[in-house]
Amino acid sequence: MIAAISAWVGARIASRSMPELPSWQRKNFAGKSTSLTGGIDAAVGLIAGSVIAGKDANKAACVASVGAALGGYVDDHWEEAFPATAKGFRGHVSSACDGQPTSGLVKIVATGTGALGAAIMLGRARDGGLLRTLAETGLDTVIIALSANLVNLLDVRPGRARKAVILAAAGPAIAGSIPAQIVVGAAAGGLESDLRRDTMLGDLGANTLGAFLGTHLATYPPAVKVCVAATLTGLNAASEKVSFSRVIDETPVLRWFDRLGRAS
């Protein structure tokens, strides 16, 4: 549990001591100015928790998070440097096929590369034949990359993405998983600021938390991972056509949880 506390303290200190960074200001869903520095406090929390945990920290999760963070940073800050913009996985790929790369495509590639690197690291620790190792490596890559993207998709309302991460990792964290404890602490450390609408995770923070969480999910037994991958694939695919915000607003329990603690 000390890893969770360290992650929380690290994120909390970063959240409260962060200076004003004009270039990190963006418009939120309500058209109000908010800071993307929530992504920094999430990353600091993950680093703090991992350092304190030492050898118990999932090194593969750190590799996945670095790739996700780099891709997220590019999408957050260099979007206008690219010849086109797009929404959704299909939009970024379609734009690239038309010779118009986007910052989102860079994010996809960087996150996918980090996910693959983490999956390879996880595969080295397993016993099994070549085919099984390749299959699980592919499955792990999908889980890590789609987990990062799903958290990103949820970062459109104050606190929503952080709450989702905490909820997803709470069970394993209570059961004693060090990586899960770290991600819970890192997500919770900046939750207050997020709920006040002062900060948001942005692509950097959402990607990083999602990749770290996804790497933990990739350590589950194969049968469980197949279910996790199927769920993540379904949710990511659904996001191309369905508004998660509308579904949440139309479902009383989800609406209550989504708005819990949020500044009016």
Image (spheres, rainbow, N blue to C red):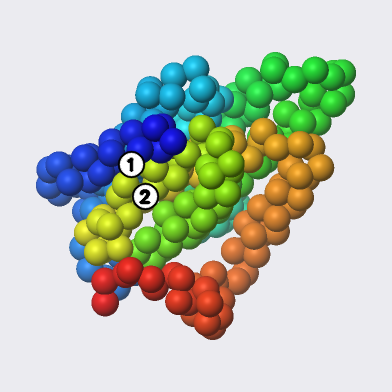
Residue that numbered label 2 is attached to: 188
Residue that numbered label 1 is attached to: 8
Q: CA distance from mark 2 to mark 1?
A: 6 Å
Question: In the rendered structure, are the residues bearing label 2 and label 1 in contact, judged by CB atoms less than 8 Å apart?
Answer: yes
Farthest left residue in view: 20
Can see residue 86?
A: no
Q: In the depicted view, which residue is nearer to us: 84 or 62? A: 62
Q: Name the residue at 77% across, 31% down.
A: 136
Q: Quadrant of the N terminus?
A: top left
Q: Residues within 10 Å of mark 1 (few under 14, many from 20)?
A: many
Q: Name the residue at 52% across, 82% down.
A: 252
Q: Residues within 10 Å of mark 2 (few under 14, many from 20)?
A: many
Q: Looking at the picture, how far across and down is residue 64, in whole percent?
A: 52, 31
Q: Earlier in the sequence, mark 2 or mark 1?
A: 1
Q: Amino acid at mark 1?
A: Trp
* Left or right: where 171 falls relative to 21: right
Q: Looking at the picture, how far across and down is residue 235, in whole percent?
A: 64, 60
Q: What secondary structure is found at the residue carrying circle 2?
A: helix
* Left or right: where 231 falls relative to 35: right
Q: Quadrant of the C terminus?
A: bottom left
Q: In the depicted view, which residue is nearer to us: 62 or 5? A: 5
Q: Amino acid at mark 2?
A: Ala
* Left or right: where 48 falls relative to 13: right
Q: Name the residue at 37% across, 61% down.
A: 159
Q: How many marks?
A: 2
Vertical placement of residue 236 versus 243, above or below: above
Q: Looking at the picture, how far across and down is residue 22, in whole percent?
A: 15, 49
Vertical placement of residue 129 versus 77, above or below: above
Q: Name the residue at 35% across, 38% down.
A: 5
